[in-house]
Image (cartoon, coloured by chain):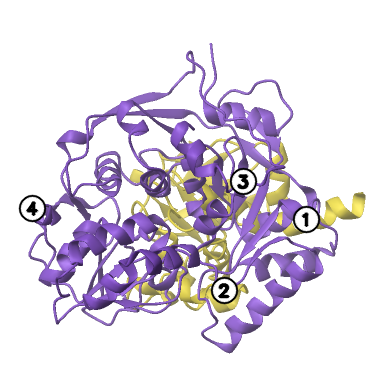
Chain colours: A yellow, B purple
């Protein structure tokens, strides 16, 4: 994982559920590209194509609520999104994102200040998000959990563990 | 200072004497449930080069979503899951005929008070109806638990919901939950464990408790519990394996709760969740008269025998409105069997309802898909946009009684006039 993530923001509201992120009928797939073709499509015209112009999703409360489908995190990665910053995440999405290697950050302070198209820089080592001239802190993941994310997800982590045992 | 149910179970399953909220532990679940997603976890095992399971007796595989197979792809995926279960000697394997995983596993006696259960489904919270800690995880993490036997878990804070009073005729625990979700919000209990207490809780049947701990997911809980009591024991008697010993886990008198919430069941009326979020709930008075095209009596929330019986009581001697399709998807084969013995099956058929095979059905996008502009009243737990087909369709959620009354009238209707 890179030490900084930089990119343009697309902003969502509260309670974006995992049925919106990827409808149930596509759960027969697990590959990123295939899932990405249908990510957020229920939101109507222009989705998901327009999301491909952005690198960071910013959302309100409870992002990823609802179904425990792991493909919600996979589909977002397939769109080329490099990180999601939300006021809060639903716990199933939170775990799935880490296990899928998708960096996520909880930072409610950022939300009111950021707009579509803004440029963000996330500094992982310093636990800071930079927007214009302002800095926003986010909590670090526990070390054991951070390791999973750093290795690109739980499958890679398992591989490493199995090779070591 | 004492401990809550979640704290006690997580301490026991991680080999600790005690744990407090915020701590991260390595916990060893008693049961790992995977449903139709099983083939995906099998693919992870192959990807990481693992072949050995930590303990095959801790796995349960139930093929419930899109069952039996609708497409060749479904059939192939199910074949992978079936072969995996056979090859690895998974005794708790249930094929496409059995029904919804949660209900099947509880009926079969695989869920005991005090158990820690994880699975590929967010509504694993339902296992708390029997005093077990159930919570959802993704398919990669299921594969990881298959292999290593454990997963990291953060000890949640616990909210205590104290129920008093008595539900009026025609009002059910589904109405209570829609009321709570509406007032607390979709993340009102985010990351929290919830315990239901109070005299009114002990008066509710195990079936009603299942609806409560299932719907609790829609206010963001990590897990939800009804403390085990005499009713729990009665349900478990004859179901549990004689060899399976369990020790009910209840909270200490001095347990620390992050919040206490009171609710008086006596003041509740029928509630309906309106499109497209479960937290968008309204008292029936504000939505009655809304036209419906389809009524879906199904899902792990409300397709248990008691739910079918409630609907049958209202529909007996009456007809489903000609412009409504009443689709009944029993939660399990056992439920269907019981309904066929007691006359509930016949009553529902004679009233104009149709049955599909047991399973998740239309709630998971199987038989009962909606077209543009159609309106469905459903007893399920989610009404998210596009969940049952067209993203231009609308889904309302209610109790089985409200559903039956509405199926007769052709519009969302108050069931209390039938009592």
Tell me the subunit letter for badge 3.
B
Q: Mark 1 or mark 3: which comes first in sequence?
A: 1
Q: CA distance from mark 4 to mark 3?
A: 43 Å
Q: Which mark is residue B120?
A: none
* Residue at position x 14%, y 56% in the image: B415
Q: Residues within 10 Å of mark 2 (few under 14, many from 20)?
A: many
Numbered mark located on residue B96 in the image? 2
Residue B141 figure quarter: bottom right
Q: Nearer the viewer, residue B159 or B351?
A: B351
The residue tagged 3 is: B240
Q: Position of residue B317 (x, y in %)?
A: 15, 70
For marks 1 and 4 on the same chain, the one whose residue lies earlier in the sequence:
1
Q: Residues within 10 Å of mark 1 (few under 14, many from 20)?
A: some
Horizontal and vertical percent position of residue A19: 42, 65
Q: Is residue B79 left or right of residue B267?
A: right
Q: Disc 1 marks which residue?
A: B56
**First of labels 2, 3 by sequence position:** 2
Estimate the x, y position of residue B352 in percent, counting from the top left. Answer: 22, 78
Residue nearest the observer in this picture, B64 or A149: B64
What residue is pinned by disc 4? B285
What's the chain of the residue with tag 1? Answer: B
Question: In the image shown, does B221 or A164 lie closer to the viewer?
Answer: B221
Label 2 lies in what chain? B
Q: Residue at x 54, y 49 (%)?
A: A94
Q: Earlier in the sequence, mark 4 or mark 3?
A: 3
Which circle, 1 or 3, is nearer the viewer?
A: 3
Mark 3, other Cα within 10 Å: few <14 / some 14–19 / many ≥20? some
The alpha-carbon separation of the residues under discs 1 and 3 comes to 19 Å
């Amino acid at each position: 994982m890179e030490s900084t993530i930089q990119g343009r923001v697309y902003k969502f509201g509260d309670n974006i559920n995992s049925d919106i992120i990827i409808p149930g009928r596509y759960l027969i797939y697990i590959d990123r590209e295939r899932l990405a073709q249908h990510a957020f499509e229920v939101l109507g015209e222009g989705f998901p194509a327009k999301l491909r112009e952005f690198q960071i999703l910013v959302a309100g409360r409870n992002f990823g609520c609802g179904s425990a489908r792991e493909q919600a995190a996979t589909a977002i990665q397939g769109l080329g999104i490099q990180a999601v910053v939300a006021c809060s995440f639903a716990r199933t999405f939170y775990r799935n994102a880490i296990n899928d290697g998708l960096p996520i950050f909880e930072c409610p302070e950022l939300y009111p200040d950021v707009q579509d198209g803004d440029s963000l820089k996330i500094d992982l080592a310093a636990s800071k998000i930079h927007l214009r001239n302002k800095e926003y802190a986010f909590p670090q993941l526990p070390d054991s959990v951070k390791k999973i994310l750093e290795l690109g997800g739980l499958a890679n982590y398992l591989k490493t563990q199995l090779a070591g045992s | 200072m004492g401990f809550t149910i979640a704290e006690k179970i997580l301490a026991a399953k991680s080999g600790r004497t005690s744990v407090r909220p915020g701590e991260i532990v390595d916990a060893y679940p008693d049961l790992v449930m995977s449903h139709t997603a099983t083939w995906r976890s099998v693919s992870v095992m192959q990807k990481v080069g693992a072949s050995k399971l930590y303990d095959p007796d801790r796995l349960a595989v139930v093929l419930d979503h899109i069952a039996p197979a609708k497409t060749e792809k479904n059939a192939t995926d199910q074949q992978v899951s079936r072969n995996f279960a056979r090859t690895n000697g998974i005794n708790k394997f249930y094929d496409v005929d059995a029904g919804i995983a949660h209900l099947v596993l509880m009926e079969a006696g695989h869920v005991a008070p005090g158990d820690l259960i994880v699975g590929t489904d967010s509504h694993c919270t339902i296992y708390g109806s029997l005093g077990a800690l159930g919570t959802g995880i993704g398919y990669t993490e299921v594969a990881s638990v298959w292999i290593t036997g454990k997963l990291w878990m953060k000890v949640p804070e616990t909210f205590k919901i104290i129920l008093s009073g008595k539900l009026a005729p025609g009002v059910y625990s589904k109405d209570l939950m829609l009321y709570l979700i509406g007032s607390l919000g979709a993340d009102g209990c985010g990351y929290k464990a919830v315990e239901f207490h109070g005299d009114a809780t002990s008066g509710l049947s195990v079936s009603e408790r299942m609806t409560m701990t299932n719907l609790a997911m829609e206010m963001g809980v990590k897990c939800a519990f009804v403390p085990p009591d005499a009713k729990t024991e009665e349900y478990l008697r004859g179901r549990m394996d004689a060899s399976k010993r369990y020790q009910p886990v209840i909270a200490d008198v001095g347990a620390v709760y992050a919040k206490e919430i009171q609710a008086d069941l006596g003041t509740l009326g029928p509630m309906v969740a309106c499109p497209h979020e479960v937290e968008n709930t309204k008292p029936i008075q504000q939505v009655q008269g809304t036209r419906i095209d389809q009524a879906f009596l199904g899902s792990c929330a409300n397709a248990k025998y008691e739910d079918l019986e409630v609907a049958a009581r209202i529909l007996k001697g009456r007809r489903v409105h000609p412009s409504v399709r009443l689709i009944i998807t029993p939660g399990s084969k056992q439920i269907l069997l019981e309904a066929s013995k007691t006359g509930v099956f016949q009553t529902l058929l004679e009233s104009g309802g149709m049955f599909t095979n047991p399973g998740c059905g239309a709630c998971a996008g199987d038989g009962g898909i909606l077209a543009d502009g159609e309106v469905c009243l459903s007893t399920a737990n989610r009404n998210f946009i596009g969940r049952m087909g067209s993203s231009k369709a609308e889904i309302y959620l209610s109790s089985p009684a409200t559903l039956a009354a509405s199926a007769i009238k052709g519009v969302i209707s108050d069931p209390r006039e039938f009592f």
